[in-house]
Image (spheres, rainbow, N blue to C red):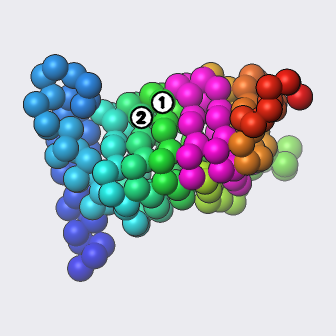
């Protein structure tokens, strides 16, 4: 029954609710609340007052857990993620759960399939800037971390670290004034 319910809300989300105006739009008139509700019914677990931006691609939602007061930005692509409380995510963020296999040079890469699918854990009070890309090699974004917009994150981010660049490197920590 739960799978049938999730399938129903997935269809409603991708054919209707995903395209409703974003909450900051003058024309939204509360329609973003419909999208948020439909998406919340798709998630494995969902906290209070979760925001899902317009045109976010969240798969079936069955592998997404999201805490209270967190948001997924407009045009984001994510799957296989556990999102803590008070997480802010800018628009166009890409989170990849796996990568292509490429180790056998005798077989075309397109025929080698995908690697192991991992679950990304985003701890509480994290800010991920617009157009950041988090690759399959990342397992955790630490508590209170900030990922600068446009960054390409290739490894885990420690608690309270501010990272940026391609590949993302630690710029400083939130409780420090000097750079690392």
Q: Which residue is mark 2?
A: 73
**Relative to 81, 9 lies left or right:** left
Q: Which mark is residue 90?
A: 1
Inspect this view and state whether residue 135 appears. Answer: no
Residue, x 13% and y 22% (percent of image)? 27
* Residue nearer the viewer, 66 or 78: 66
| Residue 111, placed above or below residue 90 | below
Instruction: Say which label, 2 or 1, has the lower sequence index.
Output: 2
* Residue nearer the viewer, 167 or 126: 126
Residue, x 15% and y 28% (percent of image)? 28
Q: For mark 1, does the 10 Å Cα neighbourhood hold few (<14), some (14 to 19), or many (20 or more) residues?
A: many
| Residue 100, placed above or below residue 53 | below
Judged from the image, the secondary structure of the residue bearing numbered disc 1 is loop
Asked if the residue at tag 1 contacts the one at tag 2, i.e. Cβ–Cβ closer than 8 Å, the answer is: yes
Q: Which residues are magenta?
A: 124-149
**Residue 26 coordinates in the image, percent (x, y):** 16, 20
| Residue 22, placed above or below residue 47 | above
In terms of image quadrants, where is residue 95? Answer: top right
């Amino acid at each position: 029954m739960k799978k049938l319910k999730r399938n129903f809300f997935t269809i409603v989300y991708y054919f209707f609710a995903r395209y409703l105006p974003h909450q900051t739009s003058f024309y939204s008139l509360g329609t973003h609340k419909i999208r948020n509700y439909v998406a919340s019914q798709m998630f494995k677990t969902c906290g209070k007052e979760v925001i899902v931006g317009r045109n976010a691609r969240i798969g079936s939602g069955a592998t997404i857990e999201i805490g209270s007061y967190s948001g997924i930005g407009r045009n984001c692509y994510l799957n296989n993620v556990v999102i803590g409380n008070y997480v802010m995510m800018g628009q166009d963020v890409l989170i990849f759960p796996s990568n292509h296999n490429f180790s056998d040079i005798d077989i075309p890469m397109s025929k080698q399939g995908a690697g192991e699918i991992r679950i990304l854990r985003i701890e509480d009070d994290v800010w991920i800037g617009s157009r950041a890309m988090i690759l399959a090699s990342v397992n955790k974004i630490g508590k209170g971390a900030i990922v600068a917009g446009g960054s390409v994150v290739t490894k885990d981010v420690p608690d309270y670290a501010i990272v940026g660049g391609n590949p993302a490197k630690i710029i400083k920590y939130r409780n420090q004034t000097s750079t690392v």
